[in-house]
Amino acid sequence: MNRMTTAEATVASLLAHGIDTIYALPGVHNDDLFDAMFKAGDRLRTVHTRHEQGAAYMALGAALATNRPQAYTVVPGPGLLNSGAALITAYGMNAPVLALIGQIPDADIGRGFGWLHEIRDQSGIIERLVDWSAHIRAPHEAPRLVAEAIRSMRIGRRGPAALECAMDVWGRAGPVAATAPLPVPRVPIDEDGVAAAAKLLGAAARILIVCGGGAQDASAEVTELSAMLQAPVLGFRRGRGVLDSRDPLSVTFPLGHELWGEADVVLAVGTRIHLQQTMWGVDDNLAIIRVTADPGEPARFRKPAVALIGDSQPILRRLIDVLPPHNRARPSRKEEMLERQAKLRARLAKLAPQLAYLQAIRAELPEDGIFVDEVTQIGFASRLAFPVYKPRTFLSPGYQDNLGWGFATALGVQDARRDVPVLAISGDGGFLYTANELASAIRHRIPLVTVLFADGAFGNVRRIQEERYGNRLIASDLTNPDFVRFAESFGAAAERVRSPEELRAALRRGFARRDGPTLIEVPVGPMPSPWEFIFLPRVRGK
């Protein structure tokens, strides 16, 4: 045993679990923690931000980009609440984010004295934002609780964890024994379930594979199964890139909607298939096979024909081994799918302004470059039509779909993946949620390229008011700064372009710069609505 403070024991345990960066905003409640971070020296990077939401979003981006646990720390009360949007987004995206949250003095928690940043039942609030949480009460508890928090991110439903510690406990010293990373039990594969799935798939005439974020690490297996079964693969948002978009069997939302209506078996991998089951419909002629790490997920809407619980990669690998004796001879669907893809492109031509800019981005972003989606006009179109070639290269915010997540999250993506270019898109509404983090990008030399599409409005809100509320516009028009001068005032490279061709040239300049951020503003007008391609009618059942 070594004598250490709670903060020192926490930092040592984080390092032992491979966490070498903490995204942070300091404050008096965490002073001893930051002192321990300083003492760790070069072993631990501290990336400090200008707002707590920036720290949490950067940790989220780093976690999504690497699929490894990432940590952030903030003060209690306002600090926790400011980071809350990122934390619930991490929950919705099954991202391994560890929040280290300060607290008021230990003996006064819950007594309502009015301490700085005191908040009623902070532990209860944290519990509702994450999958696993605990309160560190003494130095010797820290290593075990850090180990349990990290392990929780790898068991069952993936997601964030939080550790809370009082300001007077961080600096308390005592004997501490290290805790090694805890073993993660392997979920045994349900061989009977795999056999049942193989029989269903083998006998099916028209199969659709639907992928979500839980399929990102099973790209090779999904690709192999798709070829064996001649099954199209629908990836919407978090499932994009599991199957290369250049494969004719890779489909996006509108074509997936058609195929859902035709399918006799759906293989759903790492996805809630919420929209499909609730909006597109189900009936007795559709058998659904669920592959998910969350044992509570399969029966949430409708009991599936087969539920396989565990990580998708080993389950699908086993299914590939078992499937051949059951699989019927299948003619290639390549020509059929090429024809259907062409018809979809003709339909999507309605979104020509958005598509032209997305084509410019795709032409300049390398195949392994990472595209970070945002809740904006271009973002909605990207979910329908942006080609994605590799796993974990299209990051979208999941069902929270929270405006303003993109820029700060993309900074974390680029900070964690400095080996590849990262591009963030944003609207003028969402960008100003965290535009102050340009200061963090300059401070920490993060070479993110951001394309800011500015229409002077919360564009999606304004369209709804125009189309559904008789053009009664309220609270949707914006007053903006000069974004180029704004970015340059921080020291960022910035320019304004007015066409897809000019955007391509600006992107080349931005990606060539690796010592700091680049902002490219694109003034735009109203864009065609994507809703007809997203809010699709029921095709099965009543």
Image: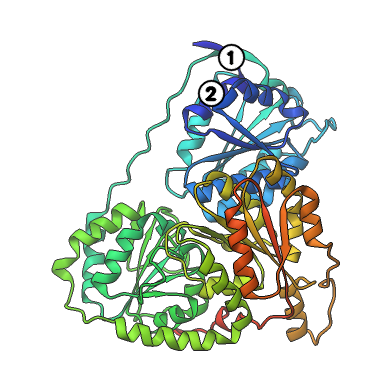
- Tell me what residue is drawn at x 57 percent, y 35 percent: 21
Task: Tell me which numbered mark, 1 or 2, is placed earlier along the sequence.
Answer: 1
Q: Is residue 421 left or right of residue 56?
A: left
Looking at the picture, does residue 303 appear above or below residue 205? above
Q: Position of residue 265 (x, y in %)?
A: 32, 75
Question: Could you say where residue 272 lies in the image, as x and y percent from the top left?
Answer: 47, 64
Disc 1 element: strand
Identify the disc placed on residue 12.
2
- Judging depth in this view, the residue of 336 and 260 nearest the camera is 336
Return the x and y of residue 300 as percentages of the image width and height: 47, 63
Instruction: Reply above or below: 30 against 215.
Output: above
**Label 1 amino acid?**
Met
Report the number of numbered marks. 2
Q: Residue at x 26, y 56 (%)?
A: 317
Nearest the eye: 496 or 62: 496
Q: Is residue 372 left or right of residue 520?
A: left
**Rendered image coloring scheme:** rainbow
Question: Is residue 239 found left or right of 31 in the rendered image?
Answer: left
Specify the amino acid type for callout 2: Ala
Label 1 crowd (10 A; few <14 / some 14-19 / many >=20): many
Contact flag, marks 1 and 2 (Cβ < 8 Å): yes
Q: Quadrant of residue 217?
A: bottom left
Residue sitting at 84 percent across and 79 percent down? 473
Q: Residue 407's mark?
A: none
**In the displayed structure image, the side of residue 411 where residue 541 appears, left or right:** left
Splitting the image into 4 quarters, where does residue 445 fall? top right
Q: Which residue is mark 1?
A: 4
- What's the residue at 42%, 47% (across, down)? 156
Q: Is residue 542 visible?
A: no
Which element type, helix, strand or loop, lies under badge 2? helix
